[in-house]
Every structure is written in C-alpha cells, then in structure tokens.
Image (tube, coloured by chain):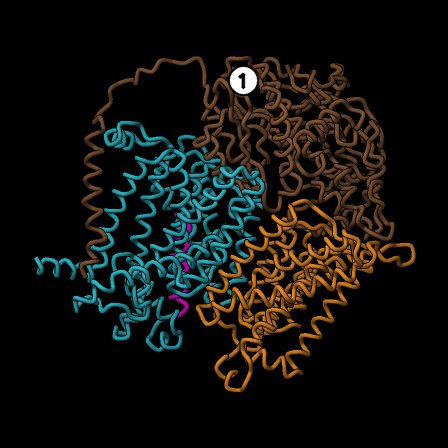
Amino acid sequence: MKRHLRGPKAPVVGLLAATLVLAGCGSGGRDGDDGEGEVAGDTTSVTDDSITIGGHYPLTGVAAPGYSEIPVGAQAYYDFVNDNGGVNGRTIDFIVKDDAYDPSKTTAVTDDLVLREEIFAMVGGLGTPTHRAVVDDLNAEGVPDLFVSSGSLQWGDDVANRPTTFGWQPDYEIEGKIIGQYIAENLPDAKVGLFLQDDDFGTDGESGVRQFLEDQIVSVQRYTSGNTEIGPQIAALQADGADLVIGFNTPAYTALTQLNGLGLGYSPQWFYSNVGSDPTLVGGLLANFSEGAVDGAGALDGVLTTEYIPAVADTDSEWTKLWNEVWDASGEDGELTNFKIYGMSQAYTFVQALVAAGEDLTREGLIEAIEEQGGDFAGPNLAPYRYSADSHLGISGMRVAELKGVASTPLTPVLVTDIGDAEIVEDTSGQDEDGPAEGGIPQ
Amino acid sequence: MLQFTNTALAGLVLGMIFAAFALALVLIWRSTRILNFAQAPMAVLTTYIALVMIEDGQSYWLAFVVALLCGLVLGAVVERVVIRPVEGKPDINAVILTLGLFIVFKSAAEVIFGTKLRTYPPSFGVRGLSVGDTTIGITTSDFFTIGAVLATMAVLVALFRFTDLGLKMRAAANNQEVAKLLGVKVGAMLTLGWALAAVVGSLSGLLIASGGLVQPSYMDSIVVFGFIAAVIGGLESPVGAVVGGLLLGFSLSFVSGYIGAQLVALVALGILMLVLTFRPGGLFAATQGRRV
Amino acid sequence: MSTLTTRVRASWSSYPLVRHLVTAAIALVVVIVVLTAASDFQATKLTEMAYIAIAAGGLTLLTGLNGQISLGHGALMAFGAYTTALLYDERDAGLPLVLVVLIAVAVTVAVGVLIGIAAARLHGPYLAGATLTLAIAVPGLGNQFKDTLGGDQGLRLFVPEIPQWATDTAYYLTGSDPSRSKYVAFLAWVTLIIVFILLANLASSRVGRRWAAVRDDEVAAEIAGIDLTRARVSAFVVSAAAAGAAGAMFALAQRTVSPLGFSLNLSLTLLAIVVLGGLGSLTGAILLSGVLVFLPQFVQDLGAGANIDATRASQMATLVFGLTMVLVILLAPRGLAGGLRTLRAKLTSATSSRGGSHAGPSGGSSGGSADSDPDSPSSTETAAPRGNSSDPTITKKGTS
C-alpha cells in the first residue's frame, strides 16, 4: 500500500519547496519601470546577415492541391535572392507551416511562428477563414502581416484597426465590378447565372457583380467546398435559362462545371474569375477525358476570365522568363505552374518592400515603406498596388481576357478601380509595361 | 421538368455511388462485425494504382481489374496483420484502429502520389444522353456505375443467402465459438470477409473516380454519406445499403438543386434521425442492432 | 507510524472526494510552476492540451464508463465555443468569465439533453452513424445563420482583461506580468482541474456505478431497477457539459470561432484520445491529449531539422500520428493508462507481494482491470457494478 502514498507525497514536498523558492525569488512587489530605453523600432529576428519570415498554407488535406505549390514558388524565389547575396546583405529565411486549412491549426502554427520562431513578418498567409483567425493577433503583436493570399477586402480596408496587414491580389469585389461592367457593356442581353463558392469569395464577388448586373442575373447557385456533386446546381442554372455563367470558384470546380455541362448538354458562355481559370491546370485536367469530347489544351477555348499577373503561358513576358529561370535554378522537381508563379510574384513584392525599407530594417520601417512607396512598386502586377496610409488593399485592377488554348487574348486594357462605388477606369500608369529589375532582384 | 429530371438523375447516380461504398461497409460488418472507416483511403490507394497504370498507357480495364485485385490483397493483408490482434478485444478498439488506418493510408497516398489534382478517365462517355432534341443528364458511364452497383448488390445477396460460404462467413462473424464447433475456419472467413469488402470498396473508389477528379481526400465526403446510407439501410442488408444510398442521393440532390447546397449535411442528419427514430436498427434491420 | 499510515490509507481509499481534492491541490501547484517556467508558445500548446483534455474527459465518462460511442463530440464543443463568442463579442463585454463559462456549459447541456434522448435508443454503429452525422451537420449551422454566427469566417471574440488581482499575484510569484497566453492557459487548466474533479467524483459515485452497470449488462441493470434511458441520457448530458466547458476554453484560446475549427477531425481525435488513453481512464485522457498536441509538432521539427521540405514534413507528421494510433491499439490494447499500469504492476509486484493487505479496504477492483491504480482518477474504471447490494429504491430515486 505504501506505493499509493509515495506517488503524491514526494512531489508535494518537492513542488511546495519549488513554489516557496519561486515566491522568494519573486520581487514581492513592483519596482517601477524596468528601465529599458525606447529603441528605434522592432527588429525581431533581424540580424546583420539574415531575417526570418513565415507563412501558413494548407500543405495537407482537401485544400492542399494547388495551394500547397504557392509556398514552393515563393521559396524558390527567396533561394534565388539568397544565392545572389540577399537583400542588404541579409538572406531571407522562409518558414512554411501547414494549417491544413483549419483555422484552429492556423492559430497554433501562427503562435509557433510568432512566439517560438520569432518571425519578423508573416508573408503570404493563405486563406480567408484561416487568416482571419490570426489577423487581429498579428496586429496586436505588431507583426507585419504582408500580402495575405486571399482576395477578401478585410486585409486592406480597415487600416486603423489592422495597421500591419496588407492585401496583395485584387480583392474579389473589384474583380466582380470589372467583370460586371464588362458584361453590362459588351453583353447587355446575356441572362447571367452566378456559380459561387459558399463563402466570402463568392459573397464579395457577387456584391461587385451586382453593382452592374442586378437586372441581368437570372440564377444564383452556390456550392460548398469539398462537395464535388454539383450536377443539381448546374441543372438549376440551365433550367433558369442562364446563357452566361460567372463562376467565383476554384480550378477544380472549373473542371467540374465543364464536365457537368457536358453531361447535361449545357454550354453557356463561361466567365471564370481569375482564381478558377488557370487554363494550364484545368486544361490538363480535362485533357484526360476521352472520346474527343474535350481536347485538353482547347478545353477552355472561348472562356472569359480576368488577369492581374503574367502566367505560365505568357511565354513572351519578361516576368515569365524570369520565373522560369528562378524555377530552373531551384533544382526542384515538377513544372512551373501558375500557383508557383503566384508565390514568386508575392515573394518579389516582399523583396521590393525590404529594399524600400532600407538597411536599418525594423517592423515599423517596413510598414511605412510599403505605405509610402508601395503604390509605385514596379512588379509583375499589371495594375499598381493601392498601398497608402489609408488603404492596404492590393493590386488595383485587372484586364478581361479570352482563353485560347493555354494562352489568352486580352479583351480590354488594364482596368483599375477601388472598392465601393469607385469608378472603373483605364490604367494609365504603364504598370503592365514594367519588366523585372536587372538580374531579377529589385534593387 | 428538365431540371426535375436532371436533378433526379443526378440523385440516382449519386445514390448509387453512396450505395457502392455502403455495400463495402455492409459486407465487412456482416462478416466481421467491424466498421471499417479505413475503407475509403484503401480505395483511394487502389484507385491511384489504376490511375498510374492508365497514365502509363495500360488498358483502362486491365487497370480496373488490377485495382480490384490490389484491393483484395490489401484487405486480406490488413485483416491478417492489423485487425486480427484486436479480434475479441473491446469493439471500440477496432473502431479506433480503423480510424488510425484511415489516417495512415490517406497520408500514405499523399506521400506516394502527391496532392496534385488529377483526372480519372471515364469508363465510357461523359456526354449526356440525347432524347430527341434535348440532352438529359445521364451518361453511358453513369449506366455502368448503376449496373455495377446493382450487380454487386445481387452478388452479395446471393452470397449470404444461397451459398455455403456466405453462411460460414455469417457464422464466423456472429458466434465464433459455435462456428468453430461446426468446423468453420473462422480465421479464414474473417480474412475473406475483409478481402471481399476491400474489393467492393475498391470498386466504389473506381466508380466515384471515373470521369471525375482525384486527389488523396477525394473520398472524404463519401465516407460519411456512404456510412449514413449503410446505417439507414440497416447495416445488415445489401438491399438496405442500396435503398439507403438512393434515399440519401435523391434527397441531397434535390436539396442542392432547389434549396441550397449548404443544407446538405443538415438534411442528411434529419433523414438519419427520422429513420432511426422509427427503426433504431435501420430500415432493413433483421435484428436489433448490436453494440460497437 | 504504521497506524497513521493505515489511517491515512483508509481515508485515502474510502473518501474519493478527499483523494480528488488533494490531487487537485497538487495539480494546481504543478500547473502554476509549469506555467511559470513555460514560454508563451509552450503556454499556448498547454492551453490546447487542456481544452482537448476537458472534452476528452467528458467523453471518457460517456464512452468508457457508460459504453456509448460518440463520433460527434467536437460538434458539442462548437455550442460552447459559439456561446462564449456571442457573449464576448465586443471589447469589455463586462460579463464575468465564470458566468460566461457557465452559460456556455448550460447551452451545451441543453443541446446534450436533446441529443442524449435521441441517442439513448441507439446502439453501436447506429449511434456512431448518428453522432458522425452530427459532427458534419453542426458546422453547417454556422453558414446557415450567417448573420448571427458569422458564416465561414465565424466570430471574433475578445478575451476579458486579466483581472488586477491575478496580475498582482502572478507578479508576486514570478516577478513579471503574466502574458495573455499564460493567463488563458491558467484559466484552461483550472477549468480542467475543476471539471476532472467533478467527473472523477461522479464516476466513483452511485451515478457512475449505475452508468457502468448499464454498460456491462443492460438486462441486469434493468432488473436492479436502473432506468436505462435515464442513465444513458444523464451520461450524455454530463459529457456534453464537459464539452461545453472545453468549447468555452477553445474560444478563449483561439479568439476566433468558425465552422472549420469543429471539423470531423476534432471529433475523431477526441474519441481516439479516449480509447488510446485507456478507455475509462481520466488520467489517460489527459496524458494522451498531451501526446496528440505535441507529437505532430515534434515530428515536424524533426523534419525541419533533417531538411525535409515543409510539405513532406507535414505529411509525415500526419502519417506518424496515424501509425501511433495503430501501434498503441496493437501494443497496448487497454490504452496508455492500461499499459502504464501493467508496467508499474510488473515493476512493483516484487515489493507489494511482501505485504499481504495491499488490496486495501476498497476491495480492490471489481469489474474493471485487475491492476487499477487508486492514486489516480483512473480508478473510475473500477466503478463497475459494485452496487449489486445497493438498495434498488435508492438507486431509482437517486438518478440524475
């Protein structure tokens, strides 16, 4: 029976002793300020020869296909920069954490990045519901939260409450507006159906589209991510007589809508938002279907979409040439994809921001540099960023294009606008003419 | 009218897909009294094997058969190596074991085949059938799916009802002691049950994949709905599995098409609770349900 | 000395409440010491461990003691978490924390009653199917009632300021102000201790014995005058209450509550903890929660150390997680707690065989495993129908 007592008793004594010791060590009261002087800024993780940044991405699980390639692209570009001496003599150490697209895991891995890895900044954290779980904490801690991989408005439209967060890609609302206006002007008789992902992506896009197409919309169908049975929704679009369908959906669902359209003999004019229109990916997927019903590369011919950065198929673009060079230099397996280009383009923007922040890198200095100079960053973005002290929203516009094979033909010049009822105008900044900096690294 | 027809047809095909998976669960339940949650990722693995063969230029149907055979072997191996030690232990151990296997096989699929989206070629056509001027939403591939599921159901009914082997399998599952006394090789029967169930599971994986997108999680939603279908049907009965699958397939299809896809899971819960309230052992329960 | 030992031993064994309170006091000290030493990051991990363990503790009673399987306990946590988020939807909401947690528990209990009544008629796979469906259906509610529940993005909540006395006490003990993550970790662990004491007491009370009796033999239990439905529903409600408290802690720790956080994964993880920890063992549930929270981290760090890319490392972490589940079941069928007990019994069998009376006045184990350990709350496993002799009339009116 002795063993029953030994268990609790020994630790009790030990712990009580420990507590007493700790209490003794405790100061027993406050001694006023700890006397540390104010430093010029927060330099967490910044050393003379390196900085550490991090990001959260779905590397496993349902959302992993496609999205897991984004950090691979970003990493390839950071490696490229590091191999060429880094930025201001500092190499960029990029830590990627898997959150499996589960917001509670995002919180956990962000705690890990901020508290344990002590990252200087979060860069490119992916997903609306996931990033939303950590955005306020990052701001509370003063961690720069740059270039969120999501088109939700909230990363940039509330600078007062989220001073360290910056969006990157055009938000879904301005994309909806640009799509809506294009259709209202060029296809005024179209009966419009909407095919929307049942979350902010779909909701924001819908609100943009409705500014111009309120009277033309005949049907709105939604799908929940993960449920691949969308036949009933496509049948409903068909029954409601939609002859033009705007899809705010992911690439997998672009392939599924095309397949279900075939099954139902339903072939409206499709207009996919940028996210879902990756012709290389979707065309590759559809290529596998036999009987010549679909012939791969041409699977999406005639489909309308929007563009805001050069893609894999834009082989003439200096940017795409650079990305190919970066990808080859990385020595990684696999092909360059548009997801990887997305990651590289984002990484390029971050390097620009670092350069702009100068040699004495601080968190405050970095944010200030983006607010002051970000609007003029000459990156792969076709339209300028909207960064300023009042707005942290990302790229200000895009152009409408028609797919042909894996390439595309622009139908409009680059159009820029802003959220709310801001007018849509042609971009005159010449941003789409920019090429990469000498050597592929911003100076 | 066309929408109604097409939604119903989509429900029919969806129901058959649920049924295919439910049949595998029923088979394993009847032959070993275990719910195999790992059925789905096992099917994912065998489907990927077939896909790799097809991408490699092998014949579609050769790959199909090879996948089924791989399922047979995988099922037998899993039973002998992993499941056998927990036979006779508390049943919940087997549940957790299959959940563990679920994770193992799924991440194995991610490690081996990557998370890239791929397409699986359809068994037959992907175009809807033409009736006069209109196209209705059912394809030759869908007919194959329906036929394959109904045939599997018929084979299972016949196996359990009319054959000596089926009787032995049931005996081995229901009462091992008595079965042993009757000279049934209980161990062999359990292995056979798992092996056959894995074949049916692999079949469901192939049917779901064909003409669709494949990635390591592609069967996740089927696991839940297939399981619900099996429970609605009563877990004991192959016919019940198909009826349960169809009931669920039609309901979910009409909810998606006419009300809103976000309600699908709630409706599934409603149907399940409704059925279980009146028949706690499912629609086709022969006896009262047993404990896990 | 020996009489003292005997007396202490006697009270130790025959007054579970005393035993549990002493254990709790020790646990509280340990928590304070550990949290003082821990980094902020470790504190967040410990918080995660605590809320997982609280929910797993409730499920331990339901599944381990009462024999009802639930694949949907994560969904019950969602009710507690959303309630907490709704009550703390603005800064300085002003409601005292204790009240908020109690409301969260009450809401979850109300839901638990409904589900418990429906579940009481179901057995085995049918119950599994129903609770599994619950696990996937409940997160959908968040999207359905977008206006109040925030849809896909969920709700943001504001953790109340750390009360002054807590700051002062912490400062007195450690010489520094407590960080918010440590404060939340402290709250979560105090909640854990309270919940576990209540659960352990309940388990060793007459109610607990009735639950076990229903699990072991329904017919016999019914003959003994136990109302089966009532026993089942009450077990479900108690486990729901724990899930509600866990949900409240989840909300405080995460500061955001959204449907994706309550995936089927969470529910299945909880069940795995209960079984792998050792069915019916509250200690096992705590230990295993720790393992499951820290293991993936550990494997990913190993991967990072070995220069494996992040994607591969994450996939490997999941794989190792699954393999661990399989191996524990195969190598220690009675879970971690069972395995440890067996090990300890082997180690101490030499010493304990000296004294003849090591069985103690409690009569050792009846119904549970032979090597149960009265030191820990895991002795709940021994709460099987000792109550054969108990007066059936008392049993009847004593329920709930």
Q: Is residue A350 left or right of residue C40?
A: right
Q: Position of residue C296 (x, y in %)?
A: 48, 45
Q: Is residue A213 visible?
A: yes
Quadrant (top left/top right/bottom left/bottom right) for the C terminus of chain A: top right
Residue B24 painted magenta: no
Q: Position of residue A36 (x, y in %)?
A: 33, 16
Quadrant (top left/top right/bottom left/bottom right) for the N terminus of chain A: bottom left
Residue C228 painted magenta: yes
Q: Residue at x 61, y 30 (%)?
A: A75
Above or below — where is B16 with respect to B33? Answer: above
Q: Residue at x 19, y 39 (%)?
A: A17
The chain in brown? A
Image quarter for residue C215? bottom left
Above or below — where is B177 with respect to A328? Answer: below
The chain in orange? B
Per the rendered image, the range of residues in magenta is C227-245
